[in-house]
Amino acid sequence: MKKVAFITTSDAEFGFSLAGVIQRISRGEDALELLKELTSRPEIGLVVLDERLIEGITEEKLREIEQQWHGILLVLPAPERPAVPAEDYIQRMIQRAIGYHVRLQL
């Protein structure tokens, strides 16, 4: 059975590890190294990355890691996300999923 791993900030230090999943705490600048380390482990099938930690990681790098890895990479929305219009958040998610910027009219 594959394992689940979370990369979070220090404010969630005990939350996921109490649930029995692998958890690594990142300060932000080491998020990419932690991501590479976890995706290199064959027993891990899902890595969940806190959205606040992806600022230093380019979309191209995230895609490269996803394509080279056998598992699933999921970005967890930040709990106290700044006031971003909902359509901007949706546009970023769509762009990440399909690789194109889509203009939405609501």
Image: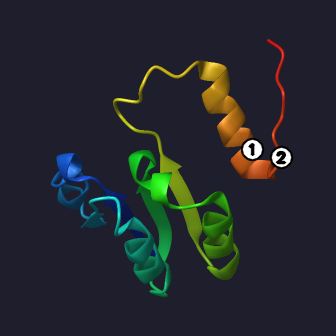
Is residue 27 shown left or right of residue 60? Answer: left
Say left or right for 51 vs 17.
right
The disc labelled 1 sits on which kind of residue? Answer: Gln
Q: Nearer the viewer, residue 80 or 55?
A: 55
Q: Quadrant of residue 88?
A: top right
- Residue underneath mark 2: 100
Please give left or right for residue 17 compared with residue 90 in the image.
left
> Where in the figure is residue 4, as x and y percent of width and height?
41, 67
Q: Secondary structure at mark 2?
A: loop
Type of amino acid under label 2:
Tyr
- Check contact, mark 1 vs mark 2: CB within 8 A: yes
Q: In this orientation, does residue 18 appear?
A: yes
x 28%, y 65%: residue? 23
Residue depicted at 37% across the width and 74% down the height: 34
Q: Which image quadrant for residue 89?
A: top right
Number of residues whose C-alpha sits closer than 10 Å to that of mark 2, classed few (under 14), some (14–19) or many (20 or more): few
Query: What coloring was used for the rendering?
Result: rainbow
Question: Can residue 1 be seen at all in this image of the molecule?
Answer: no
Residue 18 to residue 30: above or below: above
Q: Quadrant of the C terminus?
A: top right
Q: Give percent across and percent down for residue 32.
A: 44, 70
- Label for residue 95? 1
CA–CA distance between discs 1 and 2?
Answer: 5 Å
Q: Position of residue 81 (x, y in %)?
A: 41, 30
Counting residues from the start of the chain, the first of labels 1 and 2 encountered is 1
Disc 1 on helix, strand or loop?
Answer: helix
Q: Give me the disc on residue 5.
A: none
User: From the viewer's perspective, is residue 81 above or below residue 86?
Assistant: below
